[in-house]
Image (cartoon, rainbow, N blue to C red):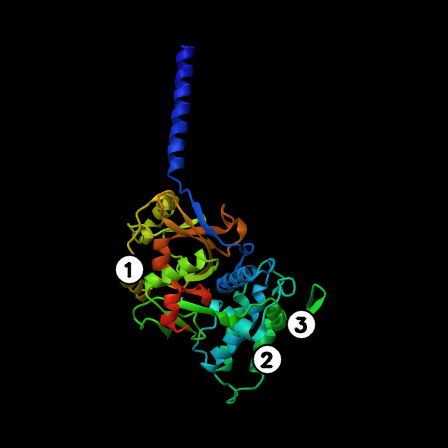
């Protein structure tokens, strides 16, 4: 009897191990195609400044490519100056523009062109007694100020309105430095950027929508393009060829896109585009949906069947707001899973400890095809044939 019991225990143990092994084999197994050296993962904390964290990560990575050592640049230096630019534009539009925490990758370059950049050790951008960055009170209070100012209660706009708004921003974030010392040398933010060899004029942005002519500069009509900067509009396949060409030739890509799909899971380190889309739940089904969320995420992560994406689908999801520019991240590599599916290694700004992958995730090729709103790249990361079409 004891022998029979022992055999049964062994059989149960072995069968459990077999089930576990079978489950394990369904997990994605990635092999590296290319992995570009980059800086450490940062944390945007409780701010809507992903545009700056992605943009600064991109610049830090460019500096590495140019032969510099790893440098931790201040995101909040850029953010603080961008708020001033947004405030002036919001005022000029009589309070009808976009004054918020959001932005685009070019906002970083626009600040750098005029004001350079500084190391994180020089400017933290936090004077409001919080252990983390949070801008809601500051943005809402300065916006309320401008909303009252543009009503023109004095029947004449006072010349001190801009000084007043900037005074509030300085109170929260601190005045930006006009000069600083680093490694025994004195710099201005502009001279520091030049010393490191970074030229903001070397970078362009691409998008891909068929409601505008291809191979021309277009105003990408999204709320966070508050400065009305222009993007080169190219077909989807050429946009993807730029991403691949850039990464395979040592250039990283600053990525702007949508992360609202059910197949996007930073926690589990992937973003896929399942062929069968999740159906929107009604209020009465919310509890059921929340209980099954983890199961759905696991199934999405292991499925090899994804949607077929074409230019028409990109335009449709953009037009009906299924695809919006709700997040910017940084593409730093390419990997393939055991089925040969291509994924893009993506550096997020939700902290290194935000998932088990050090703050990174892998976005599938299908996901990137559909959910990319725009990219920022170095001009030399554009293939020669496309360069000719764009007259670069």
User: How far apart, in angstroms, are the residues tagged by discs 1 and 2?
Assistant: 49 Å
Residue 310 has which mark?
1
User: Residue 225 location in percent, x, y?
Assistant: 43, 71
User: Residue 366 location in percent, x, y?
Assistant: 34, 54
Placement of the C terminus among the 4 image quadrants: bottom left
Residue 179 has which mark?
3
User: How far apart, in angstroms, are the residues tagged by discs 1 and 3?
Assistant: 50 Å
Residue 163 has which mark?
2
Considering only vertical position in the picture, is 118 above or below 28?
below
User: How far apart, in angstroms, are the residues tagged by discs 3 and 2?
Assistant: 21 Å
Mark 1 and 2 residues: CB-CB less than 8 Å, in contact?
no
Q: State which mark lies toward you, 1 or 2.
A: 1
Q: Is residue 58 left or right of residue 177?
A: left
Placement of the N terminus among the 4 image quadrants: top left
Residue 259 has which mark?
none
Q: Secondary structure at mark 3?
A: loop
Quarter of the view holding residue 9: top left
Considering only vertical position in the picture, is 78 above or below 150?
above
Front in this rendered view, residue 310 or 336: 336
Q: Is residue 284 visible?
A: yes
User: Residue 169 location in percent, x, y?
Assistant: 58, 72
Q: State which mark lies toward you, 3 or 2.
A: 3
Query: Of marks 3 and 2, which one's residue comes earlier in the chain?
Result: 2
Q: Is residue 129 left or right of residue 36?
A: right
Q: Secondary structure at mark 1?
A: loop
> Which residue is at the far right?
184
Q: Secondary structure at mark 2?
A: helix
Quarter of the view holding residue 261: bottom left
Q: Residue at x 44, y 56 (%)?
A: 248
Neighbour tally class for label 1: few under 14, some 14-19, many 20 plus, Cα within 10 Å: some
């Amino acid at each position: 009897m004891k022998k029979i019991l022992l055999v049964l225990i062994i059989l149960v143990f072995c069968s459990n191990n077999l089930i576990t092994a079978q489950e394990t084999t369904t997990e994605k197994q990635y092999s590296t195609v290319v992995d570009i050296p980059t800086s450490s993962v940062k944390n945007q904390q409780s701010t809507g400044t992903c545009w700056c964290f992605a943009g600064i990560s991109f610049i830090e990575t460019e500096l590495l490519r140019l032969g510099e050592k790893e440098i931790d640049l201040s995101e909040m230096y850029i953010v603080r100056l961008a708020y001033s630019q947004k405030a002036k534009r919001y005022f000029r539009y009589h309070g009808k523009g976009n004054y918020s925490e959001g932005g685009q990758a070019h906002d970083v370059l626009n600040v750098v062109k005029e004001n350079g950049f500084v190391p994180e050790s020089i400017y933290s951008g936090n004077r409001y007694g919080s252990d983390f960055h949070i801008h809601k009170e500051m943005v809402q209070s300065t916006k309320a100020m401008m909303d009252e100012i543009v009503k023109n209660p004095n029947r004449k706009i006072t010349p001190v309105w801009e000084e007043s708004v900037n005074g509030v921003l300085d109170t929260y974030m601190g005045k930006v430095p006009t000069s600083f010392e680093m490694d025994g040398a004195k710099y201005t933010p502009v001279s520091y950027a030049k010393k490191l060899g970074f030229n903001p004029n070397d970078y362009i942005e691409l998008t891909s929508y068929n409601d505008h002519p291809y191979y021309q500069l277009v105003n990408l009509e999204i709320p966070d393009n508050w400065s009305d900067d222009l993007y080169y509009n190219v077909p989807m396949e050429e946009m993807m060829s730029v991403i691949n060409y850039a990464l395979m030739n040592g250039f990283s890509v600053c990525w702007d896109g949508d992360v609202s799909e059910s197949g996007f899971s930073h926690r589990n380190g992937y973003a896929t585009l399942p062929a069968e889309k999740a159906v929107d739940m009604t209020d009465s089904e919310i509890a059921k949906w929340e209980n099954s969320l983890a199961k759905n995420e696991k199934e999405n992560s292991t499925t090899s069947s994804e949607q077929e994406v074409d230019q028409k689908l990109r335009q449709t999801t953009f037009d009906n707001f299924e695809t919006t520019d709700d997040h910017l991240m940084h593409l730093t590599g390419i990997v393939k899973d055991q089925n040969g599916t291509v994924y893009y290694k993506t550096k997020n700004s939700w902290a290194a400890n935000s998932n088990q992958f050090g703050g990174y995730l892998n976005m599938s090729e299908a996901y990137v095809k559909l959910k990319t709103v725009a990219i920022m790249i170095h001009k030399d990361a554009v293939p020669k044939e496309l360069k000719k079409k764009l007259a670069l």
